[in-house]
Image (cartoon, rainbow, N blue to C red):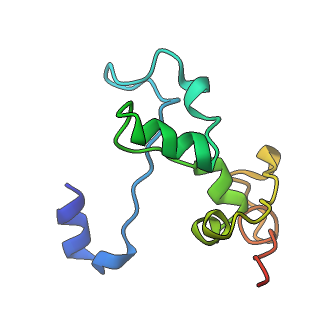
Amino acid sequence: MVEAIANEIIGDKVGIRLSTFTDYMEYGDSNPEALGLYMRDDGSMTIDNGNAYLVAFGRLFLANSDLPKRFELDANLNKYDRDTFYTQDPLVGYIDFPFLRV
């Protein structure tokens, strides 16, 4: 399905949102809160130990669009503000967090 969507629009513009907090068609997680607390080191350790193939950093990405670079440099992270998630205000939320200055 993702491939079909990517073929209809420009393929490098397609994203997927994975949400363990959703209980849809018998999919979901019995303890989704435990999955929402990963930081760089424990996320890497979870994969290295074979306990997961993928770790998502959704909330951290909302406040740190440059998250891979911050992880690479072990830089401080912006704190996310859940009250601004999915707001209709075009000036608050996704675009008002500062970028890393190196």
Q: Quadrant of residue 5?
A: bottom left
Image location of residue 46, percent across then percent down: 47, 36
From this view, report whether residue 45 is shown above or below residue 62.
Answer: above
Q: Residue at x 76, y 84 (%)?
A: 102
From this view, report whether residue 102 is shown above or below residue 76.
Answer: below
Query: Which quarter of the figure is the N terminus placed in?
Result: bottom left
Q: Nearer the viewer, residue 16 or 45?
A: 45
Image location of residue 17, percent across then percent down: 45, 50
- The residue furthest top is 30
Image location of residue 48, percent across then percent down: 41, 41
Q: Quadrant of residue 34?
A: top right
From this view, report whether residue 23 is shown above or below residue 94.
Answer: above
Q: Nearer the viewer, residue 70 or 8?
A: 70
Q: Nearer the viewer, residue 37 or 22?
A: 37
| In this rendering, position of residue 63 left or right of residue 33 | right
Image location of residue 69, percent across then percent down: 62, 72
| In this rendering, position of residue 66 left or right of residue 12 | right
- The residue furthest bottom is 102
From this view, report whether residue 39 is shown above or below residue 11.
Answer: above
Callout count: 0
Q: Residue at x 28, y 76 (%)?
A: 11
Q: Residue at x 61, y 50 (%)?
A: 40
